[in-house]
Image (cartoon, rainbow, N blue to C red):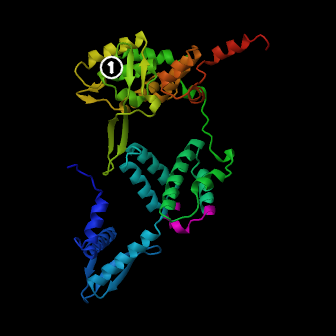
Amino acid sequence: MTNIDIPKSEILQYAIDNDMIDSVFIQEQIKMQRNEELLSKHPYKIWKGKDGKWYSYFPDKEKGRVLRKRNTEELIKDEIIAYWKKQESNPTISDIYSEWINGKVQREEITKATRDRYNRQYEQCFLDFGKHKIKSISEYDIEEFVLDAIYNCKLTQKGFSNLRTLILGIFKLARRKRLVSFSISELMNDMDISKKLFRRNVKSDDEQVFTTDELPKVLDYLKENPDIVNLGIFLLFKTGLRIGELAALKKTDITQNVIHISKTEIHYNDDAGNIVYEVRDSPKTEAGIRDVVVPDSGIRILNRIRLLNPFGEYLFERRGKRIRTYVFRERLRNICRKLDITMKSPHKIRKTYGSILIDNNVQESLVINQMGHTDIKTTKKHYYRNRMNYTEKKNIINHVADL
């Protein structure tokens, strides 16, 4: 006889229709459970006073909290349940944000590191706006908030992109819950935001890359002080890896002159507020999964690293523990300080590497593969900088025939 899979919903309905289950009892149990959930949200204790009455505090906008009393414990609990039911029917923007961001993390749509970045953006711009009840917010209120946030928080266009993500997430969820009726996507698309409103984060080329004067100094220092951290920084100059990719490298990721990139280090705050560093099995973007070709000079560096860490699973370990990204960052800052050159992060090494490839007319398809970018526009717009010193620039201009 063939087994037939019957949906659970159909089985339940059959049981109810044939009086096999007491539906009234089930409804009562669900109601009781729901009431317990609402009571658990109440931040204040319930107590019996000397007068025999039952007391509890309730949140209050003006006073912070107010005291209420009822004749019985059941009545004060009913009051609490009614209060939180009302709050749920018109939550604050902050409540909706929490529901949206927590859902994203639970469904693994975003990492905890991304959650932390969104939380920082929220704390920067939303703290006052987030206190408003969602149903009281109009389209005009949102437009005013956006313009004020850009101005008061001194947002760049990139910073606004993060803010926009939060606004869309909050109000799309609010619309699905039928708390608002307008389309936040249409509202945001229709907004006329002047580019002049955004803060421009303009940096000179010598702040963005290691110049032709600085690069030999740094490389010479790394050669003269070849511990495992310095060799890791040296490898960045030879490969253009992201710092998180470097820290997550395993020895098995390397085959001859190729490094296979499929992991990165992330960090986030756990529930106790502690910073947690983890290796994630996927890089920053899909294009980040790639095979990076290492020059012969880079292979010599890899061989020296293996000698310093012969038994570790990860390429970069000290005393049996994987070396975290912050160790490389801090070391590079110290090197810049010692050499009296402009302070730069490991990401500036990556920009230097990309600029060197383009300056040497490397085929564009190879450039984007090495960099882990989806197209050459990204590399040229955000990574390509002039590395020449003043004398080199002057000599080139002096040799322009028509000047």
Report if residue 130 lies within the magenta region: yes
Magenta stretch: give its range. 129-140
Image point 41% across, 10% down: which residue? 297
Q: Name the residue under label 1.
A: 227
| Residue most extreme to the front | 1
Residue 381 on image: x %, y %: 60, 29
Front residue of 315/80: it is 80
Where disc 1 sits, the SS reads loop
Instruction: Judge whether residue 278 is colored magenta.
Output: no
**Callout 1 amino acid:** Asp
Q: Looking at this view, name the residue that lies furthest to the left.
A: 1
> Measured along the vertical axis of the image, is residue 2 above or below residue 139?
above
Q: Up-down: is 9 above or below 61? A: above
Residue 396, image x and y in percent?
68, 13
Residue 289 visible somewhere in the drawing: yes
In depth, the one of 261 and 45 nearer the eye is 261
Rendered image quadrant of residue 145: bottom right
Q: Main secondary structure of the magenta part?
A: helix
Crowd tier of the residue under label 1, counting other residues whose Cα lies within 10 Å: few below 14, some 14–19, many 20 or above:
few
